[in-house]
Amino acid sequence: MALTRIPNATELVASGFVARRKLLSRVMSVLLFISAALSVFVTTAIVVILVSESWDFFAQVSIIDFLTGTMWTPVFANPQFGVLPLLLATLQTAALAMIIAVPMGLLMSIYLSEYANPKVREIMKPALELLEAVPTVVYGYFALLVMTPFLQKFIPGLAGINLLVPGIILGIMILPYVVSVSEDAMRAVPNGLREGAYALGMSKWQVALRVVVPGAFSGITAAFILGMSRAVGETMILAIAAGQNPNLTFDPREGAATITAYIVQVSLGDLPHGSLAYSTIFSTGLVLFIMTLGFNLAGFYLRKRFREAY
Amino acid sequence: MTTLRSIITAAILSTTLGTAATAREVVTIDGSSTVFPISEAFAEEFQIETRIRVTVGLSGTGGGFKKFCRGETDFTGASRPIREGELQDCSENGVEFIELPIAMDALANVVHKDNDWAQCMTVDELRRMWEPEAQGKINNWNQIRDTFPDAPLRLFGAGVDSGTYDYYTFALTGVEHYSRGDFTATEDDNVTVQGVSSDRYAFGFLGLAYLDENRSRLRAVDVKQDDGSCVGPSVETARDGSYQPLSRPLFMYVNASALDRPAVQAYADYMMDPENGIFLVDEVGYVPLPEEAFEMGRAKIKARKTGSYFDGGSEVGVRIEDLLAIE
């Protein structure tokens, strides 16, 4: 029985094995490049479509009217194209969400990273991440049918459809994203720093607040920016619980349509393709896109600015 | 063309279903999405009983008439009477039709159950509330009537793609699709129910079916009639025509020559049988016609009384009996 011999280099080249390997590796790297490029391509395609479709819109509606008008009624008898009511509602709900999510998220991640013993964390973190699995339509009806009637007992003048409740629910919805990322960032702070601080006589709370949080600042910021982008782009909760009335208001007790709620409402109907009302889908979508892009850029800058390398 | 199409469709269907090769008759229905639930309910029951195939589309009233007047469909549902232009299309293509009311619908103006001021409103007040000129201006109850409270007026209503919105705006302003845009417009009437029932200062409009389901949470506002009486929306007032201008008949138009086909005739008879009609219409949430109306409808079919009662224009204040008169 002949032992199989390991072929030498010349034999390998001659048999075409090396050429095949080289080819395979080329093919693989091209395939990998294509899949990576696909995401860039999709993003570019979205931008191109948003901009080109909005182009038709801005050819007919001046950009000044669009940005400064206070009424938004594109599909009605007296069409007005002022995006401010939608924009203001979007920003208000996102801000409310952050008012809930920032302190709660920070406290929760500090607890999970610094205080909780491993057993508790093993139960709490997955439980929190389960919140991610709740469909947003469920959150929407929860806001509309449970939270709003409950809060109406305490908050005078709270309308049945309002910005306040979906804002709060939105904050709860983004909590898992925020906590998960910022807790990871806190845990990545090297233990040596904590031990050094304890050695200097700091209490646990001081260590958490003055060492861990500043040390993980860039990661925490990234977590909140991510949450903010998510809140701005959220659709179902707002379409259900914040209503579809383009209402220019600073009072979160009133209902108002956000950009996403408007888009989903008008896309459900049968707007003739190419009409001005149809192109509002893209012009408002562009505004939304620019907003989230702005948040992400800000997050990128903050991360670089406060990055602590260990 | 129609027969050819139906034979082909039937042939394909019978092949796919693996039944005998003999072509099965097909009855084609299209038209209004408001009437669709009724047609669908009829079609379902009818198919079970007769094994005649019925296809029901929902192209909207306008889209339905387009196909109907080209002779492509046997029936078309409509949430308003046929229009002048559609009448012309039909006559150009030699399509004669019989106009059959199949149900009544009433639109209800609704407020919160604790709203104790808006009891009876005039059409004029409603128009001032909803017309395009109100956009951004009429935002307070006391702008509607001096004695109403100084409180924000929050409006809810059907979305612009619904026949409900079309008819409501038509009834108030005389022009379909003519209203303000700064209200909560939704295609889902449950949103209106929720919005109005949770807000003391809200005002909305809905189909009667939704009001009846939610009488414990909503209150309907009476509408002041020309004779000064206040009438609220209900099955009775919709039926006897006393609730104006917000009650409307729903129609089924049938192609007169298609009635020569036994399947179409059978379906028309089925629809005009009060035993089916009253029960099914009630079940899908509309106001059934009075029993006499079915009798008159059958007589109208039998006499092949073609044409529209309306002469190509919408009218408010029509009684069912007028529509069905053969003379």
Image: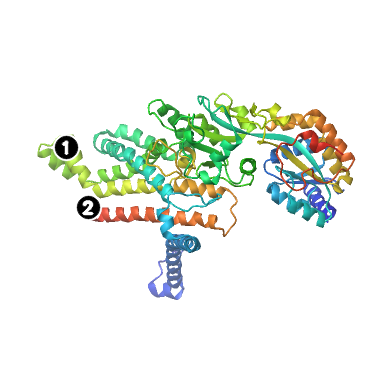
Residue at 40% over, 55% down? A67
Q: Is residue B138 shown left or right of residue B49?
A: left
1 and 2 marks in contact (CB < 8 Å): no
Image: A154 above or below A308: above
**Residue A88 x, y percent position in the rendering:** 39, 46
Front-most of residues A136 and B74: B74
Tell me the quarter of the picture where residue B222 sits: top right
Residue A306 - label: 2
Q: Secondary structure at mark 1?
A: helix
Front-most of residues A198 and B298: B298
Q: Is residue B273 visible?
A: no
Identified by mark 2, the residue type is Phe
Q: Provide the chain ID for the residue under circle 1.
A: A
Q: Provide the chain ID for the residue under circle 2.
A: A
Residue at 76% over, 44% down? B310
Tell me the quarter of the picture where residue A162 sits: top left
**Residue B221 x, y percent position in the rendering:** 58, 29
Residue ranking furthest to the left: A200
Q: Are marks 1 and 2 on the same chain?
A: yes
Image: B101 above or below B115: below
Badge 1 is on which residue? Answer: A206
Identified by mark 1, the residue type is Gln
**Residue B232 x, y percent position in the rendering:** 63, 28
